[in-house]
Image: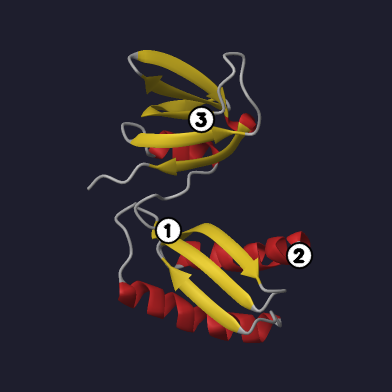
Amino acid sequence: MKGAVERVRTIVEPTLTGMGFELVDLQLAGRGGLLRVFIDRAAGTGVTVEDCATVSRHLTHLFAVEGVAYERLEVSSPGLDRPLSGERDFARFAGRQVSVRLRSPDAAGRRRYTGLLRGAHEGVATLEVNGEEVAVRLDAIDRARLVPQV
């Protein structure tokens, strides 16, 4: 299924970029029956229901041309707890609260951190946790998300 996800990603990503959106995540579920596409504005201003409908219509036509098989397509925003992936996201959301889960415990024996994201450079994200700076290698991160601000 991983190969199918990468194939769809290579089709979807440039299309969304051309429309002024970015692909945040793409998921195939139920043996490829459900295709979920999470989008955001390239400027980070969020998406509307109309944006999701527009992208859904466009992708439906694109998938017909490209022969992408699916039963149901869902297009939505990534939500308030937007996942972060790649150095670009970690740099872009500097100044925001994030929750990070590591693949395995670090030298301090911790797997989870919640703190203020200071940024990322050369594959390392910097967080401020309880007044202390913590450096986390991006390739050691299992999952990272924005902490919703309500």
Amino acid type, callout 3: Arg
Identify the residue at horizontal 74%, vertical 67% (top origin): 4
Residue shown at 76% from the left, 64% from the top: 1
Q: Secondary structure at mark 2?
A: loop
Q: Residue furthest left?
A: 150
SS for callout 3? strand
Residue 102: x %, y % from top left: 59, 32
> Is residue 41 depicted above or below 117 in this figure?
below
Q: Which mark is residue 1?
A: 2
Within 10 angstroms of label 3, few (less than 14), some, or many (20 or more) residues? some
Q: Residues within 10 Å of mark 1 (few under 14, many from 20)?
A: some
Instruction: From the viewer's side, name the closer residue of 106 and 55.
Output: 106
Question: To which residue does mark 1 refer?
Answer: 78
Q: Position of residue 119 (x, y in %)?
A: 42, 28
Give the CA separation, mark 3 to mark 1: 21 Å
Give the x, y percent position of residue 89. 46, 41
Point out the frontmost of discs 2 and 3.
3
**Left or right of 127 on screen, residue 107:** right
Q: Residue at position x 56%, y 85% from top?
A: 61
User: Given the image, on which type of amino acid does mark 1 rest?
Assistant: Pro
Contact flag, marks 2 and 1 (Cβ < 8 Å): no
Q: CA distance from mark 2 to mark 1?
A: 22 Å
Q: Which mark is residue 20?
A: none
Among the 4 quarters of the image, the one containing residue 14: bottom right
Which mark sits nearer the N-terminus, 3 or 1?
A: 1
| Lower position in the chain sequence, tag 2 or tag 3 | 2
User: Which residue carries the number 3 mark?
Assistant: 112
Relative to 26, say whether 132 is above or below.
Answer: above
Comparing 143 with 90, the one in front is: 143
